[in-house]
Image: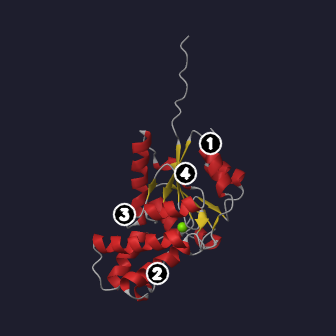
Amino acid sequence: MPVKPAAPPYPKRLYLFDIDGTLITSGGAGETSYREAVAEVCGSLAPLEGLNFAGNTDTGLARSILSAAGKDPTGEAIVALHDTYLRILADRIHRHQGKLLPGIILLLDRLKERSDCVLALLTGNLAAGAEVKLTHYGVWHYFEFGAYADDHHERNQLGPIAAARAFEEHGREFTPDQIYVIGDTPRDIECGKAFGAITVAVATGKYSREELSSHSPDFLFDDLSDVDAVLKAIAPEH
Ligand SMILES: [Mg+2]
């Protein structure tokens, strides 16, 4: 009688985590560093007027800011602004009272031990900024790869980039119904929907449960502290 081959140990789900307001709060270190970099490079904070940091990408912000400052947002000008930002952030991250958000360590531990779950990042941070922040809070090592502001200035373009990177890393395609985008802003929800992924909103950032709910995420949590309930919803066992 033929032996039924064992199910291949393929990863079956891809979890794409946002950083600020979802995994951690940097206690304002990120935004303050960006503001200081703008003041240093542009000579004033005026170009920041009316800009919403939440859910934006650092490269998107840089393009808007440099244009508002009357500068050509060339690659070189953006790199100069970001080098300044990263230098300031590396110092400020130690001086602000940030924290890991509720349930994060346990949730990451539980997902990481599962062979059917892949953990990665989808964030408006620059890759280097993401590393500074998550290393400081001790969670950088959980994530295999990421899609970052370096990859595209529009967040909605980052989902397919993350999926392509997952294919490179794992040699198999993750279909949108196997991909979860987890974030704290309407822009995270929009970004997940833009490539057909499952959207998971968490009200630990600047947006309330009600505000997030109006953007119709597939799942919505006040925070991720009830890890069993979160896993039951977004990572049910086979
Ligand atoms: Mg966020």
Q: Tell me what residue is drawn at x 52 percent, y 78 percent.
A: 32
**Where is residue 65 shown, x and y percent of the image?**
38, 80
Closer to us: 79 or 214: 79
Instruction: For marks 2 and 1, give the CA distance.
Output: 40 Å
Label 1 near label 3: C-beta < 8 Å? Answer: no
Write down the residue under mark 4: 141
**Which amino acid does the dot numbered 2 rest on?**
Glu
Q: Is residue 54 visible?
A: no
Q: Tell me what residue is drawn at x 65 percent, y 55 percent.
A: 105
Write down the residue under mark 1: 113
Write down the residue under mark 3: 152
Q: Is residue 104 depicted above or below 172 in this figure?
A: below
Q: Secondary structure at mark 3?
A: loop
**Which amino acid does the dot numbered 3 rest on?**
His
Mark 4 or 3: the one toward you: 4
Q: Tell me what residue is drawn at x 61 percent, y 47 percent.
A: 111
Which quarter of the image is occupied by the C terminus?
top right
Closer to us: 233 or 167: 167
**Where is residue 23 shown, x and y percent of the image?**
59, 61
Q: Residues within 10 Å of mark 4 (few under 14, many from 20)?
A: few
| Sequence-earlier tag: 4 or 3 | 4
Write down the residue under mark 2: 36
Instruction: For marks 4 and 3, give the CA distance.
Output: 23 Å
